[in-house]
Amino acid sequence: MSEFLGGLSFWWRGWVFLLKSPRFLTLAILPLILSMLFIVPFFWFIFSQLPQWSTVLVSVLLGWTTEFWQDVVYYPLFLSALLAVIIGSFFLVYVLHSILAIPFYSRLAEQTVTLRGKKSQGLSFWRMLRAGLIKTAVLLPVGFIFFLISFVPGLNLIALFGSMLILAFDIIDYSFEAVGFGFRERVGYLLRHRGQWLGMAAGLALTLPVPAFTLLIIPGAVTGAALILKIEHELNHEF
């Protein structure tokens, strides 16, 4: 339970740390400023058009039925479409943001891990970029599968939480890369500390009701993940 609670508040803890550390805060804010130039217009367009798209879809599917049945079908369809759009648009925007933010977030995780007294491998720009692009290429198909599942009534909430698990893994993976974990070590860590992983996913899910808020907390999440990272053979320093 303690690991779950630590994961639940990890992005908040990261932002508290960032606000006390100006040199880290610069690394956190720069990618956000750049990303907001396309994120805000994108979400505004998607969510402003969603009711109209749902109405058109109901008319196409049930145009031959009475107005009563159209009203009955509209709201479940709208809610399902809303979840699907949240998952799909979030993944698209997050992937674009992640590619842009690779050098910033990798350096942020590395410096946080180093400050905690843990040995960092030292990350070159090309190594950071290569690792980020490989990770994006792997996560995109998984995200697309969750997007398809989100259209199935009853499974859309599972797809949503699965998406948050992927996002939590992507965030803590910056720290895994900084300390030199291989693939098996990364998977092993998540399985050993699954309470922490589930808590991180739940903490991220709580930010979804506010459009684009999840992306705003990502720098704090990257930092918070480095702060709660546990390496069994090294001394854990608490902040």
Image (cartoon, rainbow, N blue to C red):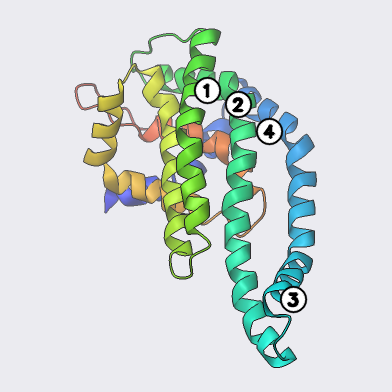
Return the residue at label 2.
99
Q: Earlier in the sequence, mark 1 or mark 3?
A: 3
Quarter holding residue 74: bottom right
Q: Is residue 17 above or below residue 159?
A: above
Residue sitting at x 74%, y 29%: 34
Return the residue at label 1.
133
Q: Is residue 25 above or below residue 38?
A: above
Return the residue at label 3.
59
Cα separation, mark 1 vs mark 2, equals 7 Å
Q: Earlier in the sequence, mark 3 or mark 4?
A: 4
Residue 229 place in picture, x, y as percent: 34, 32
Badge number at residue 179:
none
Q: Closer to the camera, 59 or 170?
A: 59
Q: Is 136 on the left-hand or right-hand side of 184? A: right
Q: Amino acid at mark 3?
A: Ser
Residue 156 place in picture, x, y as percent: 48, 63
Contact? badges 1 and 2 (CB < 8 Å): yes
Secondary element type, mark 2: helix
